[in-house]
Image (cartoon, rainbow, N blue to C red):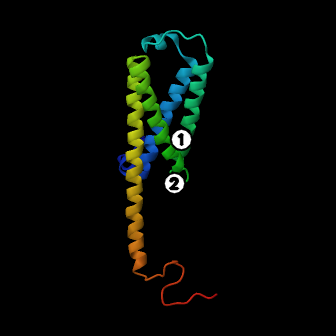
């Protein structure tokens, strides 16, 4: 059973949705990780024990909420295009924050890796969205060319040469 076909990755709309789904899965898993925070994993990543649970849990809930937004955008690319723009903004801000945190506050490798990852995710969403927009423009351009051969007037409701009533 094929989950993702080559055609899915070639079609710009499907590729954009696929990218958003992958990012949703990543965000969900990070969210669960922040809520659960297994001590062994935290130590492996270079973090000390944190006894206060509120802020890490809040960060986990935020990641899960973002995963829902990424999934909504992936399921209805045209209806929720603003969520795609928002996703680019969120991932860019996250990358910027993580780079600043790494260089000024705490230079743990996982913080730098997370910044690079979020920056790359923002870039991949942006490039996928541009590809999708261009494919839409090209297909709409073809439709406009065929419609222009019908010689429609500006409002597209009445062929030129005919008069509107009223």
Q: Is residue 30 visible?
A: yes
- In the current view of this chain or complex, which residue is farthest to the front? 104
Quadrant for the C terminus in the image? bottom right
Along the line of sight, the residue nearer the viewer: 13 or 118: 118
The residue carrying mark 1 is 71
- Give the crowd class for mark 2: few <14, some 14-19, many >=20 residues within 10 Å: few
Q: Position of residue 57 (x, y in %)?
A: 60, 22
Tell whether label 2 touches label 1 (CB within 8 Å). no
Along the line of sight, the residue nearer the viewer: 23 or 161: 161
Q: How many marks?
A: 2
Residue 110: quadrant of the picture: top left
- Give the crowd class for mark 1: few <14, some 14-19, many >=20 residues within 10 Å: many
Q: Position of residue 69 (x, y in %)?
A: 56, 40
Q: Is residue 76 visible?
A: no
Cα–Cα span, label 1 and label 2:
13 Å
Identify which residue is drawn at 56% across, 44% down: 72
Vertical side of 131 occupied by 91: above or below: above
Vertical side of 71 occupied by 138: above or below: below
Identify which residue is drawn at 54% across, 16% down: 37
Badge number at residue 78: 2
Identify which residue is drawn at 49% across, 78% down: 154
Quadrant for the N terminus in the image? top left
Q: Name the secondary structure under disc 1.
A: helix
Vertical side of 82 occupied by 136: above or below: below
Q: Position of residue 34 (x, y in %)?
A: 54, 21
Vertical side of 86 occupied by 105: above or below: above
């Amino acid at each position: 059973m094929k989950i993702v076909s080559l055609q899915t990755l070639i079609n710009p709309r499907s590729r954009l949705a696929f990218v958003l789904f992958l990012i949703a899965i990543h965000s969900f898993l990070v969210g669960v990780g922040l809520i659960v925070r297994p001590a062994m994993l935290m130590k492996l990543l270079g973090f000390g024990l944190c006894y206060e649970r509120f802020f890490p849990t809040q960060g986990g809930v935020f990641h899960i909420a973002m995963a829902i937004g990424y999934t909504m955008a992936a399921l209805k690319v045209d209806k929720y295009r603003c969520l795609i723009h928002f996703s680019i903004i969120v991932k860019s801000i996250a990358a910027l924050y993580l780079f600043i945190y790494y260089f000024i506050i705490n230079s743990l490798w996982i913080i730098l890796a997370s910044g690079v990852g979020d920056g790359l995710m923002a870039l991949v969403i942006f490039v996928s969205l541009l590809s999708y927009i261009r494919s839409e423009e090209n297909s709409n351009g073809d439709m406009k060319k065929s419609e222009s051969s019908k010689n429609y007037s500006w409002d597209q409701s009445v062929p030129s040469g005919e008069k509107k009533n009223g």
